[in-house]
Amino acid sequence: MCSRGRWRRCCETERVTGELGPVGLVSPARQHPARAIDSDDRSYFLAYEWLVQRHIRVNGVKRDEISPLWAVTYGAAAGFALWAT
């Protein structure tokens, strides 16, 4: 049995492996990537790409012709979309 203080992680590991076995240590790791990809990355990149594609369509420019100011503005707007999800 672990003592308190700096060995707290050791105690938590022992508790999880005692209750669930070694699988208990990796089961949260399997859930996190799906949750992160679903909410964080997808909402940000979909919002950013939608804004960039709209800019290209409305202004008739190529992707590399979009000014850095617009790119930063679209990134900020996509950040708000990420925050809202």
Image: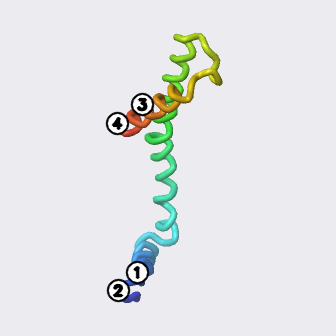
- Residue 46, image x and y in percent? 50, 29
Tag 4 and tag 1, C-beta contact below 8 Å? no
Q: Amino acid under label 4?
A: Ala
Q: Residues within 10 Å of mark 1 (few under 14, many from 20)?
A: some
Query: Image height check: is 2 above or below 40?
Result: below
Could you say which disc has been placed on residue 84 in the image? 4
Q: Which residue is mark 1?
A: 11
Tell me which label, 4 or 2, sits earlier in the chain.
Answer: 2
The residues tagged by marks 4 and 2 sit, at their Cα atoms, a distance apart of 40 Å
Tell me which label, 2 or 3, sits earlier in the chain.
Answer: 2
Q: Residues within 10 Å of mark 4 (few under 14, many from 20)?
A: few
Query: Image height check: is 7 above or below 41?
Result: below
The residues tagged by marks 1 and 2 sit, at their Cα atoms, a distance apart of 8 Å
Q: Amino acid under label 2?
A: Arg
28 relative position to 62: left or right: left
**Front-lying residue, 39 or 78:** 78
Tag 1 and tag 2, C-beta contact below 8 Å? yes
Q: Amino acid under label 1?
A: Cys
Could you say which disc has been placed on residue 4 in the image? 2
**Front-lying residue, 12 or 56:** 56
Foreground label between 4 and 1: 4
Foreground label between 4 and 2: 4
Report the coloring of the rendering.
rainbow
In terms of image quadrants, where is residue 76?
top left
The residues tagged by marks 4 and 1 sit, at their Cα atoms, a distance apart of 37 Å
Q: Which residue is mark 3?
A: 77
Point 48% across, 72% down: residue: 21
The residues tagged by marks 3 and 4 sit, at their Cα atoms, a distance apart of 11 Å
Local secondary structure at mark 2: loop
Quarter of the image where the N terminus is located: bottom left
Point 50% across, 46% down: residue: 34
Point 46% across, 74% down: residue: 17
